[in-house]
Image (cartoon, rainbow, N blue to C red):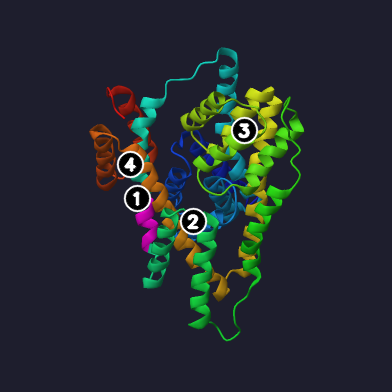
Amino acid sequence: MSDPIAAPLREIVAYFLRLGSTAFGGPAAHIALMRHDLVERKGWLDDDEYAEMIALANLVPGPNSTEVAMHVGRRRAGTVGMIAAGLAFIAPAFVMMLALGWAYTEYGTRPGFRSVLAGIAPVVVVLIAQAILQLGRTALRGGSAVAVGLLALAGAWIGIHELVLLAGAGLVTWVGWWFGARSARGPGLGGFAVVAAMPAVRIAADLGPVWATAGPVMLTPLFVVFLQIGAVLYGSGYVLYALLEGALVHDRGWLTERQLLDAIAMGQLTPGPLFTTATFIGYTLRGLPGALVATVGIFLPAFCFVGVTGFVVHRLRGNAGFAAFLRGVVAASLALMVAVAGILARDAFVDVGTVAVAAAAAGLLWWRRPNPVWLILAGGVAGALVPGLG
């Protein structure tokens, strides 16, 4: 008798290996690509389920798109599927970063990538906008959800922390449910323990012992530094880079500003999770062992957090109070995606050429609905061929 998990597991590994090898543009773009492939094309889940996965990924620290991939894997093949999806999505970028780290340490040169990224960036913004519109149709049902989303968007624009916005939006909708249409039995509070624990996790990590100090880089301190970053990091890749600068350049002197800028460039050059920047940094500091411990350190908390949130959601599925809380978190998650899209658009649309690339991508999406990977590749070709683009 065949194993009922084997076929979905092969599908999961094959899909996320391909996605991790081709998905440029950062977490928001990865989430947009996954929605196109898994909701529209493959039908593995619907928009409601996918929006819930985005909300859960936003509730905990770590790389959001990788955590969404893990949730998809859990949905298809349980805990084994969760681990397989995460590893398959990370693996291609890890290998690429190893190769770039070797080339960098051997030759000290950077690939010419800026013009290619200038062509990719407007396409990424268009894909994110499409995902926001599609998810918003199902996630923002009713005036209250729209109002919560707008409030969260305003909070994001004035700089309120992402976790505060997500938890606050969930609590607002929960309070509305409590005073409005709550069930006779009242709400279950178990799910809120996970949310309440997140600030404590951050504080504990910040106040815990820092094993690494200035001086020669040892593997154990290197692992601990990246474990701490992975355990407390909310927000975009720009937040990751800020933490890396503080921990590795200012506090410990392990990298120079130029080396960090080179590492950031490599992270933007390769597809897959931006957190594999840790692979490049680990290799430049301690070779292959350093790359391995830095990568494991920064991604390990994500596997733990996804495992915990998946367990909680399984136990509380059908609980009216938790469902209300999650609706608010979904609305705030979409608001954060809008804020990220706005930042990316500001950086992407710098001249007539980049606007033209975005208009062409939007037109093709509306007319033929091609696979977004081809649009991204076409944007990169345009950036390489059109003089002065970006």
* Residue occupied by mark 2: 160
Q: Secondary structure at mark 3?
A: helix
Q: Which residue corresponds to mark 3?
A: 250
User: Are the residues flagged by discs 1 and 2 in contact, CB closer than 8 Å?
Assistant: no
Task: Give amino acid for label 2.
Answer: Ile
Please, what is the three-letter code of the amino acid marked with disc 4? Answer: Pro
Which badge, 3 or 2, comes first in the chain's sequence? 2
Give the secondary structure at mark 4. loop
Residue flagged by tag 3: what amino acid is it?
A: His
Residue 359 visible in this rendered orientation of the protein: yes
Give whichever of discs 3 and 1 has the lower sequence position: 1
**Relative height, residue 59 to residue 351 (above, below):** below
N-term-proximal mark, 1 vs 2: 1
Residue 362 at x, y percent in the picture = 28, 44
Label drawn at residue 130: 1
Q: Nearer the viewer, residue 302 or 233?
A: 233
Q: Position of residue 20 (x, y in %)?
A: 51, 37
Residue range of the region highlighted in magenta in the rendering: 129-137
- Disc 4 and disc 3: Cα gap in Å? 45 Å
- Left-right relation of 355 to 256: left
Q: Earlier in the sequence, mark 4 or mark 3?
A: 3
What whole-number distance in Å separates the C-alpha atoms at marks 2 and 4?
37 Å
Residue 139 visible, this orientation: no
SS class, disc 1: helix
- Out of 327 and 214, give the one closest to the viewer: 214
Q: Viewer-nearest of labels 4 and 3?
A: 3
Give the residue number, with chain letter if any, for mark 4.
370
Left or right: 382, with 331 as reference point? left
Q: Foreground mark, 3 or 1? A: 3
The extreme front residue here reads: 250
